[in-house]
Image (cartoon, rainbow, N blue to C red):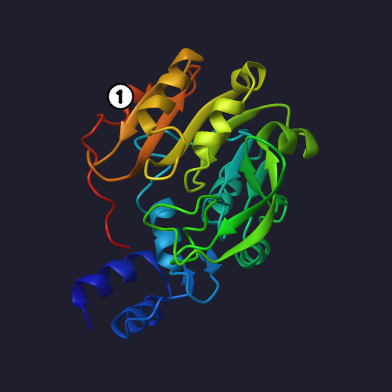
């Protein structure tokens, strides 16, 4: 047994022994039960800790007080098995929409919403891009890296499935969202399709954006995305190790959140810790 890892698991998870056994056997754990009873199950092949730990223990999308308000309307694009969706539903009375294109992940998402009394969150089983239709979703090496691009380090072996694709304005209209207080994007490069296609009227209705960027596949790199958002009235900040293809971009408007430039120093963020 790895004692330090076991202690870390024990602080965070009720089923820490199960998690440690899986890791010791070099298996991907598929069930995590937080100390407060919040429970997640993942499909086989998905390391549940890689999804849950960044949300609940590393505050990857909500750093340094960049928190969800009690009445925020939240949209989670790239919801995977629902870790951030459940996190949001536990913290806001507002509406929550989870968007996930992969059928296996979407099924786990629905189960996790039900298991955590978060079924009021709506689910859209589709990808998001700059135009509606149908596109291949290329299956990544893990269940967390499926993407609309047949390139990049996580593209896998080129196997794909066809999925429905919607635009963000179309989804918001379909589900009756008049505003978005917190938009989370973790969509494996599709952020470079989604954000440039948003009309100014919709962008004005969005107060906060937290996105993981994927410079190896996105049509727009994170610096171009930041400039785009700044021209639309957002203040931005980047959490990045300075050389990898992935990092976090935060954008905010309005006074209800701390200014992003006081949340995190550009280029100074450490690499994500192991779960």
Give neighbour class at mark 1: few <14, some 14-19, many 20+ (Cα, 10 Å).
few
Relative image position of residue 253 (x, y in whole percent) = 49, 19
Which residue lies at the image location 60% right of the left edge and 27% below the top edge?
Answer: 197
Relative image position of residue 79 (x, y in whole percent) = 57, 52
Q: Which residue is mark 1?
A: 262
Residue 68 visible? The answer is no
Which residue lies at the image location 39% right of the left edge and 33% below the top edge?
Answer: 221
Quadrant where the C terminus is found in the figure: bottom left
Q: Is residue 89 left or right of residue 62?
A: right
Q: How many marks?
A: 1
Quadrant in the rendering for residue 117: bottom right
Residue 4 visible? The answer is yes
Relative image position of residue 268 (x, y in whole percent) = 21, 36
Q: Is residue 206 left or right of residue 245?
A: right
Choose between 259 and 146: the one closer to the eye.
146
Choose between 51 and 18: the one closer to the eye.
51
Which residue lies at the image location 23% right of the left edge and 83% below the top edge?
Answer: 1
Choose between 76 and 33: the one closer to the eye.
76
Residue 83's place in the image compared with 12, above or below, is above
Residue 78's place in the image compared with 207, above or below, is below
Residue 140's place in the image compared with 262, above or below, is below
Q: Secondary structure at mark 1?
A: helix
Which residue lies at the image location 58% right of the left edge and 50% below the top edge?
Answer: 85
Relative image position of residue 55 (x, y in whole percent) = 43, 51
């Amino acid at each position: 047994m790895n004692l330090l890892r076991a202690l870390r698991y024990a602080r965070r998870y009720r089923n820490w022994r199960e998690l440690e056994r899986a890791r010791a056997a070099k298996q991907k754990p598929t069930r995590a039960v937080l100390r407060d009873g919040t429970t997640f199950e993942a499909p086989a092949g998905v390391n549940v800790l890689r999804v849950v730990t960044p949300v609940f223990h590393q505050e990857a999308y909500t750093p340094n007080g960049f928190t969800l308000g009690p009445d925020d309307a939240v949209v989670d694009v790239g919801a995977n098995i629902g870790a951030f969706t459940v996190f949001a539903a536990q913290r806001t009375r507002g509406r929550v929409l989870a968007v996930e294109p992969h059928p296996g992940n979407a099924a786990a998402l629905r189960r996790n919403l039900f298991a955590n009394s978060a079924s009021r969150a709506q689910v859209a089983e589709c990808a998001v891009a700059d135009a509606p239709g149908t596109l291949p979703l290329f299956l990544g090496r893990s269940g967390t890296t499926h993407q609309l691009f047949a390139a990049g380090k996580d593209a896998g072996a080129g196997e794909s499935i066809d999925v429905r694709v919607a635009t963000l304005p179309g989804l918001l209209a379909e589900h009756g969202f008049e505003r978005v207080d917190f938009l989370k994007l973790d969509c494996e490069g599709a952020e470079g399709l989604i954000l440039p296609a948003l009309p100014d009227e919709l962008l004005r209705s969005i107060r906060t954006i937290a996105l993981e960027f994927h410079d190896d596949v996105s049509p727009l790199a994170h610096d171009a995305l930041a400039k785009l958002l700044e021209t639309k009235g957002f203040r931005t900040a980047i959490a990045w190790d300075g050389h990898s293809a992935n990092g976090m971009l935060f954008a905010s408007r309005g006074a209800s959140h701390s200014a992003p430039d006081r949340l995190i120093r550009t280029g100074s963020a450490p690499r994500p810790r192991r779960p």
